[in-house]
Amino acid sequence: MLPSINGRASWVFTEPNYDIDLIVGVDNIKIKDVDRLKEVCMKDYDPDFANQVIDGDLLVGGENFGYGHPHYPSFIALRALGIKAVIAESFSPGFYRGETNNGFPLIECPGITKYVDRWDTLTLDWETEQITATNKNIILPCSPIPQKTKDLIENGGVMGFLRAQILAKEA
Amino acid sequence: MKYQPGESLILYKGWITQMGQTIVEKILSRNYGASVFAGDEKTFSPDIITAYDFPGYVDKYEEQMNELGITQVQNPEKYVLFIDHFYPAGTPKQQQVHEITRRFAKNYGFSLYEGKGIGHQVISELGYVKPGRLIVHFDGHISTIGALGAMGIGIRNGMIEAFATQRMSLVVPSTVRIELKGKLERGVTSRDVFHSNVEKIGPAGCRSSMIEYGGEGLKSLNMDERMTLCNLAMFLGGVSAVMETDETTYNYLRDHGHADDYRDIYPDSDATYAKTVTINLDEVEPVVVAPPSPANTVKISEVIGTPIQVGYIGSCASGRVKDFQQAVEILENKQILDGFRLYAVPTSNKIQSEMTKLGLSQTLIDAGALLSFPSCDFCIGQMGALVEGENAMTTGTLNIPGRMGSNKANIFTGSPYSIAAASITGKITDPRTLF
């Protein structure tokens, strides 16, 4: 089953071509320890971010989110803090592939940064591929979500997907 | 053998298309065995699956293959591994990564090339790349091979799927056509062409699209210049880049002994494009990419005089014969400034050998450059690392803080001409003033 995506917009990155390494900061990109990464995560945006977010929260991003040479630590930190998806105007293709294969939902929703503010509550309907800002009663259509993206997310990432394929073959 | 123009790639038996196709639609149709168009989501079988030694990548794939219980693969000849990072190893830990890469290749029967240069280059020299082929890597700079009319795509950690199943799924990308016209002026390079285009159409100007280069202007660029343009595709947001083939493509493959079954590839005249961008090469001027991001192109005039202490000509983006010929045009019979560190790092052994034959190596050494063996390591600060407060000018792929050592060093990227000019004056200098 696809995971429920229903949570608060814990931050809205309106800037286009956002370099996700800035989420933990370039100085911290080599940190491996998850607790340490959680501490530095989003510090430059909201020093209290780690205490404010709750499990199930989301991030909102602008155009070409994930541009550059994205590294994995920022999203390791965000996942550990309970962030469940990023809804953005659009994603940089390399970043999209990388995180989708990690089983992390990245959903393209043109117009999202125009209508959504921090702490709005967003829900994704996987069937109709629409985002609803429930507190504002706004419905926004997503860009088509590739079937493979859904398969990867449903299986918790590429390894889960491959294990399921191998099991299906053996059955 | 002589180039025969106009032979189009025979894609598959019973090839019928109702609509014109772009190059990427042709490549993916050939691979899929039926016509596909932008927006179609399909599963493809890469012709070649390639990767390099890097902690967290090749070692992880070996672990994942074990975890999936896959002890052998069907077509090991499709797999090519390179040892080109941390080479030669400086620590036992680095050697351990090489050992894992060697073991992984041996156990599964993959081809392995060690110490031959940067894989993104060597893969073309060895004949794995031909017009129409689909090649996957975890690293997006495999787009370099688009210069030979092939599609190289970086699929990041989706690579384990390719390793395990020889399959990958892809939504056929739309195409942005880049029509090149005219000819470059002296002192202007394909780096300038690429980075001015980032300034012109924005770093998302080709987002999620294939970049297709063509037009009369392309014919004026040699293979080295073409590879540079394709290598950097990701910084325009592109999935990858590809070029129309021509006599230059044929001659490159022939000279490397791989032109036997050569076929050209080019788009249909009624192909559908997301957009078309025209670049007049004669209007391009030297530019510099200022820190902290590859999106930050500025005219060289805006940063003239900025002190520079370190220069680096090399990487999978640049570091080919043409790049060093450009540097040598400036450095011939000159001396680099005392205390300036200039690293000249050929992209492959073959290129290094050619440089020696052409006398370029001698000129670089005489001018005071440090001529290195081929390596990826300067581009990532593994060698020639920068310290806080230093300014470097490089042809590396990337100028983000920390890429080449200290987070507090500044990396400017520019052309080999501009780097050579800075190495003489110690500051950013318009190379055209030194001719």
Image: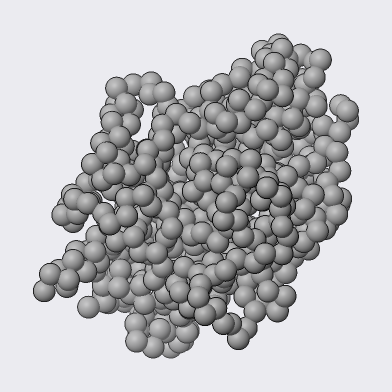
Taking the image as drawn, is residue B85 in sight? no
Q: Position of residue A84 (x, y in %)?
A: 31, 66
Image vertical order of residue B191 relative to residue B426, above or below = below
Write the residue at 54% across / 70% down.
B11
B113 sits to left or right of B301:
left
Image vertical order of residue A169 relative to residue B17, above or below = above
Image vertical order of residue A74 relative to residue B361, above or below = below
Image vertical order of residue A121 relative to residue B78, above or below = below
Q: Nearer the viewer, residue A19 or B132?
A: B132
Q: Position of residue B181 (x, y in %)?
A: 82, 58
Q: Nearer the viewer, residue B256 or B73?
A: B256
Write the residue at 62% across / 60% down.
B263
Question: Which quadrant of the figure contains the N terminus of chain A?
Answer: bottom left
The answer to which image quadrant residue A36 occupies is top left
B169 sits to left or right of A88:
left
The answer to which image quadrant residue B355 occupies is top right
Write the residue at 60% across / 56% down.
B262
Q: Position of residue A98 (x, y in %)?
A: 39, 58
Question: Which quadrant of the figure contains the C terminus of chain A?
Answer: bottom left
For the view shown, which residue lies furthest in the left direction? Answer: A171
Taking the image as drawn, is residue B134 in sight? yes
What's the image's color scheme? Answer: one colour
For the view shown, which residue lies furthest in the front direction? Answer: B1
Q: Position of residue B215 (x, y in %)?
A: 77, 61
